[in-house]
Image (cartoon, rainbow, N blue to C red):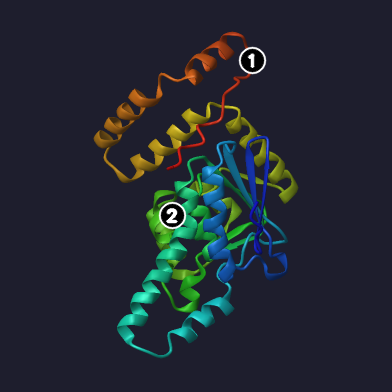
Amino acid sequence: MMSFETLTLDLSDSIAQVVLNRPEKRNAMNAAFWTEMRQLFQLISKDPAVRVVVVSSTGPHFTAGLDLKSFAGIMAQASSGCEGRKREALRRLILEMQESFSVLERCPVPVLTAIQGGCIGGGVDMVSAADMRYCCADSYFVIKEIDIGMTADVGTLQRLPHLIPQGLVRELAYTGRKLTADEALQSGLVNKVYQNQEEMLAGVMEIAKTIASKSPLSIQGCKEMLNYSRDHSVEDSLNYVATWNAGMLLSNDLMEAMAAAQQKRDGDFDDVHPGFTLG
């Protein structure tokens, strides 16, 4: 198993637990973090034993967002040389950073996030790419980029309008104010607010266990359809799910789920296929 500097990964009972692990730095996202997110989710996405992911954090805050020392280093590198080449390189860097959160959205299994304290800047970009969000009563969310003179560029402004009302997104993006846990719940950003982190992690793990107990093929199909329908018309989405189920419906999972329901027991489902390799 690959080791990580900023994250930890544990797999138990078909649940991959990903933990941001720089509490002394408020889990600020340094250079290693962006690479490790891509590497870690590549491992998760290829592991047929994983049926759900829970992303949590350490310390009093979920994350302070971008590590400003890393940001300063980027700006220093852009201080000399051909302007055109610098701009092209900066664009590539931004696309790589975007990919570090898009991996949550493209992960074939549901990704749940458990948020305590501040979820700031890049943290909002990250959790916006997850399937579900849960938080503590002391949690708050800040689109912080406006306060450092930039436009948020790794997912918040593209995904958040699909989660909460447009007017609220714009207010948060333009002002940089805190969105409290109560507001996050009322607006639909989070599914539930817990009194503290211990209760939250216990509650989110129970939800994850429920998801892990279902047909993994069906769960992956649900995520695929929900992501697709967000960006396509109803007609296109209906056509896609018809094609998907024409290929996936006649599985062992269908018969097992029906038998389990009749016998009033939990289903016993195989993991998804591990995939094919060339050669």
Pointer 2: residues within 10 angstroms few (<14), some, or many (20+)?
Answer: many
Residue indicated by mark 1: 265
Residue 138 picture location, percent across and down: 67, 56
Q: Which amino acid is tagged 1?
A: Arg
Depicted 209 relative to depicted 2: above or below: above
Q: Nearer the viewer, residue 40 or 197?
A: 40
Residue 267 picture location, percent across and down: 59, 19
Image quarter where the C terminus lies is top left
Pointer 1: residues within 10 angstroms few (<14), some, or many (20+)?
Answer: few
**Residue at 49% across, 18% down:** 252
Q: Which amino acid is tagged 2?
A: Leu
Confirm whether residue 28 shows in the render. Answer: yes
Residue indicated by mark 2: 160
Residue extending farthest to the front is 279
Residue 34 picture location, percent across and down: 53, 64
Q: CA distance from mark 1 to mark 2?
A: 39 Å
Mark 1: secondary structure: loop
**Residue at 69% across, 65% down:** 22
Figure quadrant of residue 226: top left
